[in-house]
Amino acid sequence: MSYFTIKDIMTTKVVTVEMDDSIGVIREIFSHAGFSHVLVVDPESGTFVGVVSDRDVYRNVSCFIGSLSEQARDQATLNKKAHHIMTRRLITATEDMSIKQAAELMLANRISCLPVVSEDRKIRGIVTSKDILQWVFGVPKKKATRDSQG
């Protein structure tokens, strides 16, 4: 049996946002994208500092946005910043980590993505539970649509 690593399945074109980008901006990214995580980077150093998932956005945006009941306070929820809602507990992978190790790490920590970072915390890619399932079952990946944004 050959040894497969994260590098074999990770997506290298990753969408990033900065700590002061608004939830409105992140919500817009998710509404046009085929993925559910953006990585947050420090604007000065470019290092990885957090993750925002679509679930984080949904939890923090008023359910009245876009409805007839929408009020100014509902619209204001879109002005919160990434650093207000991002996950700061950094659980990451390295390119040489085995796919099995990555899956175990995700299960143990109840997370659905692993940012892949270098020693200096620069983003190299991302691997999701979907990527692992596709690899396990031999389902080809669709062309990545995760273009970098900053």
Image (cartoon, grey):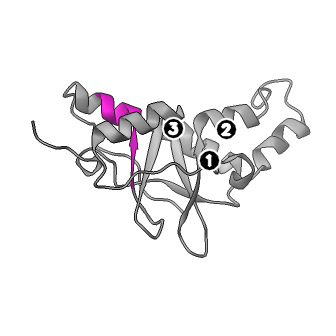
Q: Which one is earlier in the sequence, the residue at label 3 or at label 2?
A: 3
Q: What numbered label is drawn on residue 36?
A: 3
The residue identified by callout 1 is: 26
Does the rendering let one see residue 66? yes
Of the residues shown, which amino acid type is indicated by label 2? Val
Q: Which one is earlier in the sequence, the residue at label 2 or at label 1?
A: 1
CA separation, marks 1 and 3?
A: 10 Å
Does the rendering let one see residue 34? no
Q: Which residue lies furthest to the left in this view?
A: 1
Q: Position of residue 75 (x, y in %)?
A: 82, 40
**How crowded is the residue under tag 3: few (<14 C-alpha within 10 Å), some, or many (20+)?**
some
CA separation, marks 2 and 1?
A: 8 Å
Q: Is residue 63 above or below residue 118?
A: above
- Residue 100 painted magenta: no
| Between marks 2 and 1 in the image, the one whose residue lies nearer the viewer | 2
Of the residues shown, which amino acid type is indicated by label 3? Ser
Residue occupying image coordinates x 39% and y 34%: 104
Question: Is residue 71 found left or right of 110 in the rendered image?
Answer: right
Q: In this view, does 11 lie above or below 54?
A: below
Q: Magenta part of the protein: which range?
A: 125-133
Q: Are marks 3 and 2 in contact (CB under 8 Å)?
A: no
- Residue 126 painted magenta: yes
CA separation, marks 3 and 2?
A: 10 Å
Q: Do the residues labelled 2 and 1 touch (CB within 8 Å)?
A: yes
Question: Is residue 113 found left or right of 143 in the rendered image?
Answer: right
Q: What numbered label is drawn on residue 57?
A: 2
Residue occupying image coordinates x 48% and y 33%: 108
Of the residues shown, which amino acid type is indicated by label 1? Ile
